[in-house]
Every structure is written in structure tokens, then in C-alpha cells.
Image (spheres, rainbow, N blue to C red):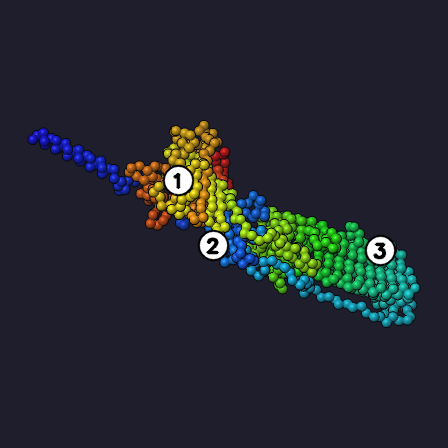
Amino acid sequence: MKLINRLSVMATVVSTMFLASCADDVYDPSKEPQATPTENPLGEGFNAPDGFNWSMINTVNLNVEVKDAFNGKYQYAIEVFTSNPLADETATPIAAGPAKQSANYIAEVNIPKTVEFLYIRQTDPNQRKEVYAYAVPENGGSLNCKLYYTATTSRAVTRASSVGTSGWDNVTDPGYTEETYNVPSESASIINGNQLPNGSTYIIKPGETLSQVLHSYNGANATVYIQGTWNVNGNITPQGIDIIVLNGGKITSTSGTFMVSDKSSLTVQSGGEVNCNIFSTATNVVIKNFGTIKAKEVSGQNGLNTGTVLYNASDALFQVEDKFIITSSQIYNHGTISLTAENAYMQANKTSAACLIANYEKATIKGNRIQAGATIVNSGTIEVNILENSSTDFLYNNCLLIVKNTFKFRNVVLDQASITGGRTNPSDKEWLPVPLVESLNSAQYTLIDGSMIKAKEFKVQSGSQVTFKAINKAKEDRSMIKAENIYFEWHTYVQGNMVLEGKQYNPERSHIDASVASTGYDESKYTIETCGGIFNEGNEGEDPYTPEIPVVDDATTYTYVFEDNWPKYGDFDLNDIVLTLNNRSTQANSNGNLKSAQFDITLEAVGASKIVGVGIRFLGLPASVTPSTFTIKGNNASFEAGQSLPTLILFESAHTEFGFTDRPFINTYQTASTNKADLPQYAVRFEFTESDKISSSAFNINNLDVFIITKAADQRTKRTEVHIAGYAPTDLANTTLFGQANDDSSLSSKRYYLSSENLTWGIVIPDTFAWPLETKNIKDVYTEFANWVTSGGKENKDWYKNHNGQVFKK
């Protein structure tokens, strides 16, 4: 009995021990050791504001509508860029897909918060490309994009050509007409050697020549009719005389100055002629020219002096060989003004009164250079080599302006008009570009109803606000600025129904409205026709077919940095694991579904002494997806079992990936012997079938949940994961650590990997990033970091570009 009792006791003890052992193998969360908080590494009282999610990436939901000229027969290709592809030849699309009538391109894109504009390029079935710029909504959101101007046809063709009207509302034409004069049969007698009695009339009859200077008595008033010739060797400076050159009459002064002086006027009738060396006027003189006036110069005493009116009639010629100076005077030209010498110029000077050059329909001003301090209103033709004006006066061009060398102006209005370099031959169809168009300080250019500037170099100079605006009054046509090279050398606003055609430079200084279509040089589809003819034929493109959806190549490098001590704070040097993700690309089929996707990940640094693995969860892929091809570094790969969303374990030990059996710091001390230049890289590749119907946004950067594993699962506990702020743990993560130590995560509130001070253990930076050296707090190394955090991400959005040098240098 004693033996039995002893055996029974032993059995009882063994049984109790066995049961206790079995109970220990069952996971009991209540027995999980509780982690205690540690000191805030960013300083006592340092908090991130509530609602700050630590993201440096915006999500934008695009809805892109095209103006389908083919009624849905073909697709249009849509590409989305973060930089203007007309300015940045290296720009690659971050998204792409098809659109057509009643089938908009719908896409979700992720972009750095530093990106202010999205550039959407449309390729139509004729393979013509246009770029439209859209401002990114603050903090992301929805963006509706109509790739056309709502008040224009898809191919802007000016119908019946006509002349614009701008500028004329402030011009009052004198309206002089050629009079018929009753010339007396007898002349007054000359008194005192060269004076005419007040109110008298003097006649130089046909066949007669007068060789002396005449004045009215005391400069009061007299009239001189010229039927013959008034020829003076020297100066002709009549005062108080109304001079009327009749048909067949002439005034000649080949050596001196012919000055229409005080209280005088000059009228040249049809068939009459003035031919002089230097022509000038006193103030407030009226000149009516129905015939011909020729001078070597209009100069001396400021040429056409203040208040002078020059009326040049429709069949009249005012010809100047050299310089033509006008000072606060007004020119009303219905005929021809010609500057004939190679270096001839017209210089307008504005003093106390306005200066005006009005060139009417069918009128012509032609010469080498106009240097204007005057308002110019043109409804005819102006043809010069150089046209410059640095004043605040306006150029109103309603028809044809030809500038063969340089155009520099501050304020310009084009109304159904053009500025070009002319044509090599009058019979040519092609209009040449102006070699240089330069907008001067604080320029304001307005283009109306299908107007056009064509240049080789188009440069925008500085100013408080430089604006180029296209508006429509009588027509729906687009206006155009066309230049091989467009340089934005100051902050420039381009607005309205405009086409910018040409390569663009310094796009960061341009603010281009979504209504503006940008194209490459000679690539736009728009025909521009003004009163001078067709100035842009428009690119007809190829025979229509559905363009191929291009490969999306995201040129952004994304850097992932982690602290490994979660749920406790670490030292916040954010270098325990450093990864970069780049070369992210996708390709969609004509239905917008993904055919393939790929990206590369590089393990850059390990500042952890524990075993750390890396995983990626694919938030945009359905749980049941089975790619036709899934490889890592060329080897077949598979998703992790037991996950509700496809999850890849990239590696289990960062140190092992570098070839270490122990766990040293790697690339976090500048000169450590354990540093490695040969970095582990992982090429991740997918291919899908059409039946998978994978959305093109599945591989957006926000749908790639890159996380680290700081403790592997064992029989008792799930694994410890650290995710970027805001990303939920996977199904295999230990969530009992939520709310412990410094962590303030909550499954019920969907708050993940944020501390009680709203700090985080992992962030993704949309750029290459120089991570802090070991133990160097990121707040100290990146001096703008703290302001970025405490402002809730509103300020110093590019904080990661400025450091104090305490970073690892490759």
C-alpha cells in the first residue's frame, strides 16, 4: 500500500507539473510584461499637434475630361507629371491611362507635399500632345480637369478675318479732308524785307521760285500758297504763316532746317511736295499731308514738338532718311511713313503731354527702329527691325506688326492681330519668328480673339506681376504665344484662352492657368488667322488611332527611416533602418488596368543592434490576387501566409543581408570599419493578366506599406512590427503593445504608431535623404524639422533639404 501511495503521489505531482507546463504554452495577453515610458527624445513638452499625420505625401483624386473630337471612336492617352514636360526633358509620368467621350480618366495619385502643380499631358488620336497645369489642392483632395477651354472649339480657326478695335476708344482722329482753295490772283507785297502784312496772302505762282524766308508781321497771321517752288539755301523758319503747298508746288531746303514755327501750320496737297534737309516744328503746330514730305531728319528743337499734330492722309507719304524725333506730339497716319536709311529710327519722347502714334487700317509705318515713349495704336502695318518701349505706354496692335530683329515692350494689347518677323518673300506662306521678344519690367500683355506672337526667343523680365492673358470678345479662338524657347525670368502669370507653344525654361517661375494649353514648338493643332493672313497653320497630326498608354516611371526616390525601440522612444536619430524605394513604374493596358508593375528597394543603413526584418504590405492589391509573374532579384517570390492583404517579407535580418553574423552598426558612423558601400538591393517585379483587373493606383507609394519587424514571432507571442505613422499592423503583428510605454495606438480609433505626444517611429521622405549620424537627434541635425512638426506640416515642407552636416555621407 505504501508503494501504491508513493506512486500515486508521484503521479499527482507529475500530472500537476504537466498541466502547469501546458498552461504556460497558452498565450495570455494579461501576462504580457508592461513596457514603461521613456523620456521624450525631442525634449520635454515637445508635441506634434493633434491631427498631424507625419505624411509628406498628398493624395489627389483626378477626374480628367477630354474634348473628344472623334465621338468615342478612339482613346486619348493621359499622362500626369509633377514637373512640366515641356520644360523638363527628364520628366516622367507618375500616372497614365485612357480617356474618351463619356469615359473620363479617373486616378488616384500620390505626390510630395512640396509639389504645387500637376501637369497633365493629353495625346489625341492624331498623336498631338498638349499640356495643362493644375494647382494641387492644399492637403490633397479632388481635382477635376477639363483639357480644353470651355468657350472654344477643339481646333481654333478664325473665320472671316477682320481688324481689331483696341486702343481706338481713346483716339480722336482729326478727320482732316483735302480742301479746295480759292487762290487770289494777286499776292500781298513783302514789307520790311521778309514780312507779310497781317491777314495777307502771298502766292508763289507756277514757274516761280522764291528764295527768301518769310514771316508774318510781328508773327501775327498770313497765308502762303505755293504753286511754284520755295527754295531757300539755309533755314526756313516761317512764323505766323499758314503754308499751303498746292498740286505741283514744292518747298526745298537741302542744306538748312525747315521749321514750321510758332503760330504756323503746313498743308501739303495731293501733288505737292516738301523736300528738306532737316524738318522740325514749334509747339502746337498742325501738319496736314495729302502729298509728299521728305526730309533727311526730323529733329532739331525736338523734331515734332510738344502738341504738334501730324496728319498723314491715305495716299500721302512722309519719308525720313535718318532720324525721326517726336516729342509729346500726335501722329495720325492713314498713308505711309517711311524711314529709309539702314540705321534710321523714330524716337518718341513723352514730356508733360501724351505722345501718340496712330496707324490706321491700310496705313503703313516702315523703317529700321521705333524707340517709343508713346502710345502706339496700329490697325494697319508696322514693319521695323527693332521696336522698343520701356515706358508705361501701351501698344495696341489690331492688325500686322512685323519686327525683324528685336521687340521689347512693357504693355501690349493684341486684338485679332499678330507680331511676327515677316516673310522672306511676299508670296511665302510661312511667317518668320521675331528673333527676340522681351517683355520689360512688370509687363502686361493681353491677346484678344485669336491673336499671336511668334518668336524664336521669348524672354520674360522682372516685375511686380508679369501677366500674359488671352481673352475673347467677338470670337472663341485661342490666342497663341509661339516661341522656340520661352524663358520665365520672373514670376509670370499666363491666363485665359491661350496656347503656349515651345520649350519652357524656369517653370518654377511660371503660374499657368488650367485653361492654357502648352505644346511643343510647331506641335499645336490650332490655326491662327488674323488680318494679315494665316500665321499658324496648325499641326494636322497623323491619321487617327488610339495612342499607346505609356509606361509610368516615377522619378521620385522615397526614403524610409525607422526607430526600432517601439513602443518605447528611441534616440530619434531615425537611422535604425534606412531604406530607399525608387524606379517605381507601372504600365496599364487600353482599359486602364495594370499589365505590369515594378520597383527597387535598397537597404541603406542599419543603426540597430537587434535583429530587424523588413516587410511590404500591398494595400491596393486584392487578397486573392495571383500575379502571373512575381519575382525578387529575378527569383520567384510569394506572399506571406496568414495575411488578409498580400504581404511580402523582404528579409528577416538586416545585418545578415550585409553579410554579418553579428549585429554591428552599418553606415551610421561616418568612418566605421563595418560600413558598406555595396548595398543590398531588391528588384521587385509583377506581371498581371487582364482578368486580374488591377487598378493603376495599386502601386501608388501610399499603397506600399513598408514596415520593419523588430522581434520575430514565437510560440507565445506574435511578432513586433513598426509601421510608418498611420499604417495599421498586419494580421500577424502583436497589438498588445498598443498603448504601452510611449505608444498611444488604438485599434478601435484606427490610430496607429503614434505616441501620446503624437510622435512617430517611422516616416517616409519623398526624396533622397541624408540620415543623421548615430545618436544625433534629427531635431538638432535638421534645424527646420521642429517647425515642420509643430506647425502640423504647414511650414518648412522641405525641411529634409537643410542639415548641419552631422549626416552620413555616402
Label 1, on which residue? 638
Outermost residue to the left: 1
Q: Is residue 56 left or right of residue 337?
A: left
| Mark before the other along the chain sequence, 2 or 1 | 2
Instruction: Find the distance from the CA under tag 1 to the CA under tag 3.
Output: 95 Å
Taking the spot 91% from the left edge, 70% from the top edge, the residue there is 186
Three-letter code, disc 1: Ser
Frontmost of labels 2 and 1 is 1
The foreground one among 184 and 153 is: 153
x%, y% of residue 284? 77, 63
Label 3 sits on a secondary structure element that is strand
Label 1 sits on a secondary structure element that is loop
| Mark before the other along the chain sequence, 1 or 3 | 3
Instruction: Find the distance from the CA under tag 2 to the CA under tag 1.
Output: 35 Å
Q: Is 497 situated above or below 42? A: below
x%, y% of residue 25? 25, 37
Q: Residues within 10 Å of mark 3 (few under 14, many from 20)?
A: many
Label 3, on which residue? 277
Frontmost of labels 2 and 3 is 2
Frontmost of labels 1 and 3 is 1
The foreground one among 322 and 431 is: 431
